[in-house]
């Protein structure tokens, strides 16, 4: 339901959704394949240290914990009520929660507005608003944070620690991102599924993320947008400090229907240009594909904004250089030749390549490049005052020592990161490239398996520099 | 250098480049970090069974093999001469090769036309043409085939066996594809780097790939195109039987220069539309990004063409469904609702989903979907005579048994693949999704980690159906 502005009582209480001292799980089940069991299992297994109160009228114990018949019967204070009972029972749980003065409720239960029960959903939402009880959901997967060892929902794993806060209407995509985080070290600060977002709105989590010290970038997946004004104003407050990345689906003809069926999102009559305009006003950076969404969020979370388009690419693969420079141009940010960027840099870098290399830009230090060649070329690029960003690329040939190149890349980055120049890497190939990417990401360097992904990241860093400048005025 | 048509003597001799009985490695080195050592090491380590003749005027033995001073001094027949000596020595080696009546030569050596020595390169090429000795290169990385245990060049690993023949001007990108093949089971039939492609042309390898029984799809990476007419006619002969995928770089302003510096490719004054037209005439499918290039090549190699756009998507993730249907529309192939595709199918599929699922299309069988739900939904989609393609998607929730879903997917596919309906899968998430993708690919089902990649694959299968129909007339 629409709001005009992020509400203070909601934003203030969101900390209880991500860092509660106590949780009541309503619908807690004794059967391991049930959602109500998985929630407690997830909390326990991932190290939740607070108090868990299973609520189940037909059980004395769940998961070895004393169970209560209702929320009202719980003896201690309850910060968060997590609801996983059928839709027709939810109203009663909300009433008990209000009586119990809980701080926030989360409704995981599906089968509300998305299957035509809009009136019921609105009634529950209004009830919560009347009692200033923030409601997250319904129809969501859960939330968590690797910094707090908090896994609350039906969520198979936590992401690795890192800079990106992910706020998603889709549970499936959120879970996919968590899996990617585990496997590809896409670090997250916290994550939350919003589902039908009946009450708590994107804007409120944006305000929360703006204050969260672990969050350096906000990544938002939208299926619908009830409250564009609230979004715009929340983003405008945050983007001078932290970048906001968005992806919006449900814009296709069949997608309009699918978005309603999924999260009751209303897109009828709204075209993509409408959303483009809102996101532009908000200062948010819009991604098109899921991969781009993840890739640019990571870069924006890890690296400073890119002050100009004077980026130098160092690669041992001419093909990777060509894919990159074509994609830069396609993305509206064509590369510049080295001689245009800085007189003399070309000569300095040539010391680190064979005669059949190319000091153009991309700088092709050739397939025979040694770790020392890379180190020298990186150093020259970082140290040149006319260079504002460095893009490194590794294409393993039979003579490439990928590990050693990665170690030098990290060494040079650590030495020069005080200069505030973004550093992005690309490492194209098999397992050793995957390992290299993980190591670089673990050291705060966004790294990718294809040139176009790295270029998207760099272009986003440039976009953010412009946004930061505009919105800080 | 330009040719008007694929030459018979060249196409006939290409088998000696990929399956030679004997190889002379000129520039064979005793030092393990040298290219001339790596070549023999690669041949040996990956199981080459033919005869290797190291050629090195200053050594009696290389890699435990008797070495010869020149190619002429070799006692037995020589099918392939692999040249890795400095540019100024190449002419002499070619003369010896002609005298020795070798079948084909490969020049790995760099520093020819790409650094301004166009005249030298042309002279060597003309010399080979005058003597009908096919020359591959110069400035290339090598070639090989996992079916023949053949790894010839400075190539760290062979790809896994599969349907895609990769023909690339860029060595770095070729090696990256081999790495991806190992790590992501992108199966290949053979691969070759063309480098500056002074003599042997794309068209000739297309003709060769057309005849190769292991090759089901040809994937070509271009930096330049000397002989458009030869390309068009070679493709036109092949595409009624096998799809051809192309990616062309060097189209950006800076890319024109970089492509020349890399593989002496000439793109001055040629815009992308020029290449679009050539590829359209040829019946080739053009990819934009490297990832798309790999993804669609795999699908086209594994699956039959898609007869119509009546594709049914089965997913447990509404978000994945939405990303997909938006991307289908963006790609010019919007999805159809189930009820438009087939009366009654919606009702049949609803038996395999909860009430909060959606039988629209994407068919959302919901996050709670069991393997049996998937199996039933897949079966209904495959069996419906109005459905021409099936797209499955797995987004692991805490209750998803990914392995069991994959096993059912394979079972259903095996049961119904005689119907000739393409089957593409998407599996979004962490390690279990990566494993699922590997298993599906190993069973001939193209599977991808993001929805947009799967959609690109399906769109390419549809494009190929149209091309096949047009060019078979």
Image: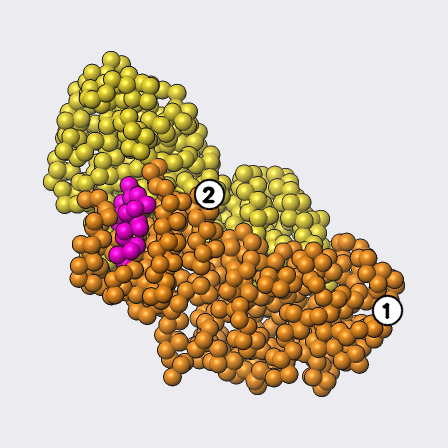
Chain colours: A yellow, B orange
- Say whether residue A327 is visible: no
Residue A346 figure quarter: bottom right
Is A144 in front, or is A34?
A34
Q: Mark 2 points at which residue?
A: B431
Q: Position of residue B440 (x, y in %)?
A: 43, 53
Magenta region = B364-381
Mark 2: secondary structure? helix
Residue B307 against residue B433 in the figure, above or below: below
Residue B4 against residue B181 in the figure, above or below: below
Circle on res. B69: 1
Residue A221 against residue B17 in the figure, above or below: above
Is A407 on the left or on the right of A6, as rendered?
right
Q: Where is residue A230 in the image (x, y as percent from the top left)?
A: 26, 41
Residue B331 figure quarter: bottom left
Task: Count neighbours of disc 2 (C-alpha within 10 A) and say few if under 14, some if 14 to 19, many if 20 or more.
Answer: some
The answer to whether the residue labelled 1 contacts the one labelled 2, judged by CB atoms less than 8 Å apart, is no
Residue at the image point whose x is 27% and y is 52% from the top:
B377
Residue at the image point whose x is 57% and y is 68% from the top:
B167
């Amino acid at each position: 339901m629409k709001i005009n502005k992020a509400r203070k009582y909601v934003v203030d209480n969101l900390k209880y959704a991500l860092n509660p001292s106590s949780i009541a799980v309503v619908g807690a089940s004794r059967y391991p394949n049930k959602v109500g069991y998985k929630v407690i299992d997830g909390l326990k297994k991932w190290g939740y240290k607070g108090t868990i109160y299973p609520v189940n009228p037909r059980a004395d114990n769940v998961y070895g914990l004393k169970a209560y018949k209702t929320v009202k019967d719980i003896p201690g204070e309850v910060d968060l009520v997590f609801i996983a009972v059928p839709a027709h029972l939810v109203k009663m749980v909300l009433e008990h929660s209000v009586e119990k003065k809980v701080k926030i409720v989360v409704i995981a239960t599906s089968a509300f507005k998305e299957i035509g029960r809009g009136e019921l959903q609105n009634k529950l939402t209004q009830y919560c608003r009347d009692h200033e009880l923030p409601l997250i959901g319904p129809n969501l997967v859960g939330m968590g944070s690797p910094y707090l060892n908090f896994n609350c929902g039906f969520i198979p794993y936590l992401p690795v620690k890192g800079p990106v806060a992910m706020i998603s209407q889709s549970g499936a995509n959120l879970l996919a991102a968590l899996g990617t985080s585990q496997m590809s070290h896409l670090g997250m600060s916290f994550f939350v599924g919003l589902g039908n977002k009946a009450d708590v709105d994107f804007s409120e989590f944006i305000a929360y993320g703006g204050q969260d010290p672990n969050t350096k970038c906000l990544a938002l997946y939208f299926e619908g947008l009830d409250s564009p004004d609230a979004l715009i104003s929340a983003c405008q407050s945050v983007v001078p400090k932290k970048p906001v990345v968005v992806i919006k689906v449900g814009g296709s003809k069949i997608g309009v229907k699918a978005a309603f069926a999924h999260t009751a999102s209303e897109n009828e009559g709204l075209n993509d240009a409408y959303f483009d305009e809102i996101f532009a006003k908000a200062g948010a950076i819009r991604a098109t594909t899921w991969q781009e969404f993840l890739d640019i969020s990571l870069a924006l979370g890890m690296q400073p904004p890119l002050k100009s388009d004077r980026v130098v690419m160092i690669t041992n693969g001419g093909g990777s250089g060509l894919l990159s420079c074509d994609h830069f141009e396609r993305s509206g940010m064509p590369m510049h030749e080295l001689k245009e960027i800085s007189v003399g840099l070309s000569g300095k870098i040539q010391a680190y390549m064979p005669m059949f290399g190319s000091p153009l830009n991309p700088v092709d230090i050739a397939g025979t490049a040694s770790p020392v060649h890379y180190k020298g070329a990186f150093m020259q690029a970082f140290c040149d005052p006319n260079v504002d960003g460095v893009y490194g690329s590794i294409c393993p040939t039979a003579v490439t020592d990928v590990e050693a190149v990665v170690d030098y890349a990290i060494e040079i980055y650590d030495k020069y990161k005080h200069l505030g120049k973004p550093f992005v890497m690309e490492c194209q190939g098999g397992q050793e490239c995957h390992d290299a990417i993980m190591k670089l990401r673990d050291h705060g360097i966004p790294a990718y398996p294809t040139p176009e992904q790295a270029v998207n990241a760099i272009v986003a860093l440039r976009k953010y520099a412009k946004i930061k400048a505009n919105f800080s005025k």
